[in-house]
């Protein structure tokens, strides 16, 4: 009996022997060639070494989304689904992070290792990064996703070095794992190489790592897992996935040739734009060790976003996004990608940055701009400045002192507070500030919404981390089977390269 293409796709977990002639599947007959197709499991997509290193079932990461959007509950559900989950600890107070880590540990099985937290480079908040690293080391957080790094900091090096030791067999082992989220080869290269000697010597001199740890850190990469961050929500360089992945792969090979490090020890994953089985299957076909999802998890049940913000996300299309100034790097002109549909945040934030770049201060603005600014702030400029000054004085006294005599700097700091609050209003679901919601989002969210339209995953109350992950991986396996058949000379119709979400028990 001959099988149809759909029947072969449905038997993706089975070894299947086919007879093919002129591109068609036939019964055994004269002139037909034998085509054996090996089984494909979702668990086999990606680099098996990744799953083994981190104790996961799938080579799939539920990425951190800053300021608690990736909640402890999201991490717990990711781990239970067989994925790696990262807590969105960036921007949270250390005591809040501590509570979150305790919640994660209480919610997963003893010995489960497939989880971690976000460590964000924070030059605007002196001492914050060091306090978070201290917390992670004391609480045994063995995996961090490092983001917003343009160059290595002593703290990320310290985290890596303190986890290094030498086994009885003489091999260097690491207890602390860094996932470096990068969008440029020059940044990736720093993580792929051993830590700079200058940083290691300074850490030893300060007593923050031992000489033995420094010696081991000089021989191994800072990070073995490099996440290529393509066109993503939040901080992004809007890079296309394929050129970025190729660029980082070539960078890895150059580092290996220059340092003697085993190129195969460095795993490159792909995030940004991962929203459908097509994106997952394409990433693995390119050679990605793992995939990382971000934007699409914000609308999930376990997300830290409010229901009104999640409903806005669920209605977004691929083009319903825009760029806006980043709160943490406003003066430098760094931008984040945000949801545009249903809010005025991106437009207002860009106008604020334009006023700052013009050199304006509140005092030098014309009355029309003053009225607009205070309308956006929802309060007088003086009231906004007093609240901003109280925060900045505590976190960065030098900036606060400069702003007292620099009206343009005061405007920048007040603008940064508005941008910060936009994200806070979205998390809280402030009903009177919907137009000011800052919701980090890439085009992946719109692609996901299109894929799940008319299925059980369309309503946000059914969008769980588990159902999203399992459907993406199962769908990717089916698409990989379709590609396997086509590569074997079988005529596979274009409609076979599709997968409709189904509910997993």
Image (cartoon, rainbow, N blue to C red):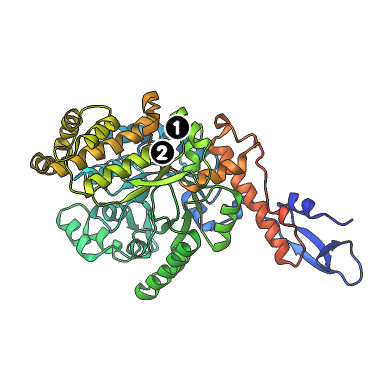
Horizontally, residue 495 falls left or right of residue 94, namely right
Q: Name the residue under label 1.
A: 309
Q: Name the residue under label 2.
A: 439
- Asked if residue 334 lies left or right of residue 318, the reply is left
Circle number at residue 2? none
Which comes before the other along the chain, label 2 or label 1? 1
Assign the C terminus to one quadrant of the image: top right
Q: Is mark 2 on a helix, strand or loop?
A: loop
Residue drawn at x 46%, y 47% as measured from the top left:
442
The quadrant in which residue 96 appears is top left
- The residue lying toward the viewer, choosing from 342 and 337, is 342
Q: Which residue lies furthest to the bottom in this view?
A: 257
Report how far apart the C-alphas of labels 2 and 1 lie in the structure.
Answer: 7 Å
Which residue: 21% across, 42% down?
412
Residue at image position (42%, 46%) is 322
* Towards the viewer: 354 or 249: 354
Callout 1 crowding tier (Cα within 10 Å): few <14, some 14–19, many ≥20: many
User: Percent x, y for residue 291?
Assistant: 51, 52
Which of the image's four quarters has the N terminus?
A: bottom right
Q: Give residue 328's position: percent from left, percent from top.
A: 27, 45
- Outermost residue toward the right in this view: 30
Q: Is residue 231 above or below residue 131?
A: below
Q: Are marks 2 and 1 in contact (CB under 8 Å)?
A: yes
Look at the image and tell me whether residue 222 can be seen: yes
Q: Give the answer, above or below, for where 502 lies relative to 227.
A: above
**502 or 365, which is in the foreground?**
365
- Residue 261 screen position, x and y as percent: 39, 70
Question: Could you tell me residue 21's position as x and y percent?
Answer: 84, 68
Q: Is residue 92 visible?
A: no
| For residue 404, side relative to residue 74 (left or right) | left
Would you call the spot at circle 2 few (<14 residues within 10 Å), some (14-19), or many (20 or more)?
many
Circle 1 — which element? helix
């Amino acid at each position: 009996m001959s099988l149809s293409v759909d029947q072969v796709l449905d038997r993706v977990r089975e070894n299947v022997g086919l007879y093919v002639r002129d591109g068609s599947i036939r019964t055994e007959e004269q002139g037909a060639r034998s085509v054996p197709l090996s089984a494909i499991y979702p668990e086999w997509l990606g680099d098996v070494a990744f799953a083994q290193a981190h104790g996961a079932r799938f080579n799939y990461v539920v990425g951190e989304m800053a300021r608690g959007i990736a909640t402890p509950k999201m991490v717990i559900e990711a781990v239970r689904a067989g994925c790696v989950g990262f807590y969105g600890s960036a921007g949270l107070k250390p005591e809040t992070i501590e509570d979150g880590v305790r919640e994660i540990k209480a919610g997963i099985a003893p010995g489960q290792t497939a989880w971690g937290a976000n460590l964000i480079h924070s030059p605007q908040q002196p001492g914050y990064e060091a306090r978070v690293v201290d917390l992670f080391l004391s609480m045994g957080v063995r995996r961090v996703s490092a983001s917003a790094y343009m160059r290595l900091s002593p703290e990320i090096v310290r985290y890596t070095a303190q986890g290094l030791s030498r086994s009885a067999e003489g091999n260097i082992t690491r207890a602390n794992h860094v996932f470096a989220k990068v969008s440029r080869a020059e940044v990736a290269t720093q993580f792929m190489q051993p830590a700079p000697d200058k940083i290691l010597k300074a850490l030893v001199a300060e007593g923050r790592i031992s000489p033995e740890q420094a010696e081991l850190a000089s021989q191994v990469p800072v990070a073995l897992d490099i996440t290529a961050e393509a066109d993503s929500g939040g901080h992004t360089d809007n890079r296309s996935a394929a050129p970025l992945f190729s660029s980082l792969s070539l960078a890895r090979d150059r580092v290996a040739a220059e340092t003697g490090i085993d190129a195969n020890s460095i795993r490159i994953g792909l995030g940004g734009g991962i929203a459908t089985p097509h994106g997952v299957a394409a990433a693995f076909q390119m050679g990605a060790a793992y995939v990382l999802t971000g934007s699409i998890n914000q609308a999930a049940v376990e997300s830290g976003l409010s229901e009104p913000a999640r409903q806005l996300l669920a209605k977004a299309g691929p083009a319903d996004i825009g760029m806006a100034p980043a709160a943490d790097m406003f003066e430098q002109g760094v931008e984040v990608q945000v949801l545009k549909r249903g809010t005025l945040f991106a437009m207002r934030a860009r106008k604020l940055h334009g006023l700052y770049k013009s050199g304006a201060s509140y005092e030098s603005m014309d009355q029309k701009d003053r009225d607009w600014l205070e309308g956006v702030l929802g309060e007088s400029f003086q009231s906004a400045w007093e609240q901003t000054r109280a925060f900045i004085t505590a976190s960065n006294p030098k900036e606060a002192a400069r702003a007292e005599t620099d009206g343009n700097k005061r405007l920048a700091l007040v603008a940064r507070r508005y941008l910060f609050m936009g994200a806070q209003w979205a998390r809280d679901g402030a009903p009177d500030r919907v137009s000011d919601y800052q919701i980090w989002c890439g085009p992946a969210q719109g692609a996901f919404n299109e894929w799940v339209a008319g299925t059980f995953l369309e309503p946000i109350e059914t969008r769980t981390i588990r159902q999203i992950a399992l459907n993406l991986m199962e769908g990717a396996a089916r698409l990989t089977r379709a590609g396997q058949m086509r590569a074997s000379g079988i005529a596979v119709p274009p409609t076979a390269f599709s997968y409709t979400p189904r509910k997993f028990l």
